[in-house]
Amino acid sequence: MFDKILIANRGEIALRVVRACRELGIKTVAVYSQADEESLHVQLADQAICIGPPASSDSYLKIDRLISAAEIGDVDAIHPGYGFLSENAHFAEVCESCNIRFIGPPANAIRTMGDKNAARDAARKAGVPITPGSDGVVETEAEALRVAKKIGYPVMIKASAGGGGRGMRAAHNDVSLVQGFHAARAEAEKAFGKADVYFEKLIVNPRHIEFQIVADSHGRVIHLGERDCSIQRRNQKIVEEAPSPFLDEKLRAQMGKASIKLAEAVEYQNVGTMEFLVDEKGGFYFMEMNTRIQVEHCVTEEVYGCDLVKEQIRIAAGDPISEHIAKATIRQHAIECRINAENPAMNFQPSPGRIDLYYTPGGRGIRVDSHAYAGYTIPPYYDSLIGKLITAGSNRASAVARMSRALGEYMITGVHTTIPFQQEIMRNADFQRGNYHTGFVAAMQR
């Protein structure tokens, strides 16, 4: 096992890793930008090193500064969290070249599955269903029009190096295709430094279902079921739950088998997530793979009674998959709400600033993963996530009721939050029946 780990991230995920390491008896080194000096992960880690100015491009995305901090801290491994450099194959290679273990998959797997075109090709070769789409990158407006005509409208334009909903545009005709093509390329260039886009057939109002993969370096791959992430706004997840109210045992088994098959095909190791679109008839199509821990991993932890961050660390250290994880079964239902510093009444405008009052809900079946506290200032430079509220119950109805109650107890003043909007979702009759899809939020807002 490792002696000391550097956490190349910030916010709630950095704090999550600090806590996992402490329970494993591993020392931690936190890195922080000047804007994050008062963050909880900095205060609770065994050591903290400033790596630059507030902008992530000058701090959390600087590989040389992270490696320098790792050398100063004399660490054995680096945990990248999610976002930032967590899916950067070059960063993984640099870590290994410096004799520092990267807590994640091998660089080759990151490179293959991080490129959406390469991932689709790998899925196709593995016999996993994919949506009809372009054969690789679409480079010109003329080619875009030809491909769209071949696939048939509507189509989805997607950044090859994309993630988090960036570099994505839906097109329903030639006019919106041309506009979306150029807009997606520009957004992809700004967000990922790469303007490449590809096209997929747009499945109207599907379910967005992802499967949690765990794979070790000894050739064993398992899945820990699915999470339903269909409650989204502009491709950004708002509410997640497991198990999905849409899947039956047969479809769950089929999708789980396909997820394992694809992970084995790319020789995947560590944890990762296979993402699928599922149509109303139960047809499923591979969309992409996230080669890292997910924001919503807590949902699976509550449903299956496991700790995925600890498992990441153990697997990176060379251990086989823990038997209690390999044998885990569904034991309860869980729901997660992402609490963001945004104002739903003002088109979800970001609301950075100082938190005056911060009170988290409690009681049976409630978990809060957050780095926030009273007096903490949410900086304007990063994602607006304040924390994640997770509720669990013996069935879906109890988990929903518990979430509704917990949201009413969660008090945050000084900044606007998404809590009122999520309360509205919990009260929605269709949501309570499990009757929703990726167009649910847009329909609510009409």
Image (cartoon, grey):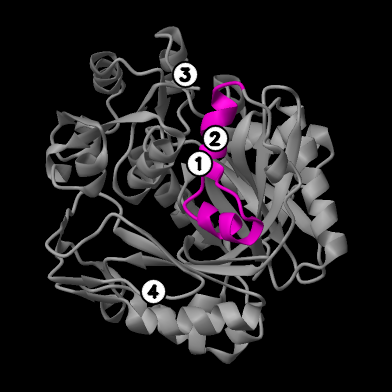
> Label 4 crowding class (10 Å Cα cut-off): few <14, some 14-19, many 20+?
few
Residue behind mark 2: 312
Q: Marks 4/1: CA distance? A: 23 Å
Q: Position of residue 363 (x, y in %)?
A: 43, 76
Task: State which tag comes first along the sequence, 3 or 2.
Answer: 3
First in sequence, mark 3 or 4: give its number.
3
Amino acid, disc 2: Gln
Q: Is residue 186 above or below residue 48?
A: below
- Residue topped by disc 4: 362
Identify the residue position indicated by label 3 in the image.
101
Q: Is residue 150 visible?
A: no
Q: Residue 309, labelled with which disc?
A: 1
Q: Report the magenta stretch's main SS.
A: helix
Residue 338 on the magenta segment: no
Going by the numbered disc 1, the residue's amino acid type is Val
Please tell me which residue is depicted at 60% across the width and 32% down the height of the picture: 270
* Tag 4 and tag 1, C-beta contact below 8 Å: no
Q: Name the residue type under label 4.
A: Gly
Label 4 or label 2, whichever comes before in sequence order? 2
- N-terminal of the pair, mark 4 or mark 1, is 1
Residues in magenta, as a range: 291-318
Circle 3 Cα neighbour tier, 10 Å, few/some/many (<14 / 14–19 / ≥20): many
> What whole-number distance in Å separates the C-alpha atoms at marks 4 and 2?
28 Å
Q: Is residue 290 left or right of residue 167?
A: right
Q: CA distance from mark 2 to mark 1?
A: 5 Å
Asked which secondary structure carries label 3, the reply is strand
Q: Residue at x 51, y 71 (%)?
A: 365
Check disc 2: other Cα within 10 Å, few if <14, some if 14-19, many if 20+.
many
Label pair 2/1, CB-CB below 8 angstroms: yes
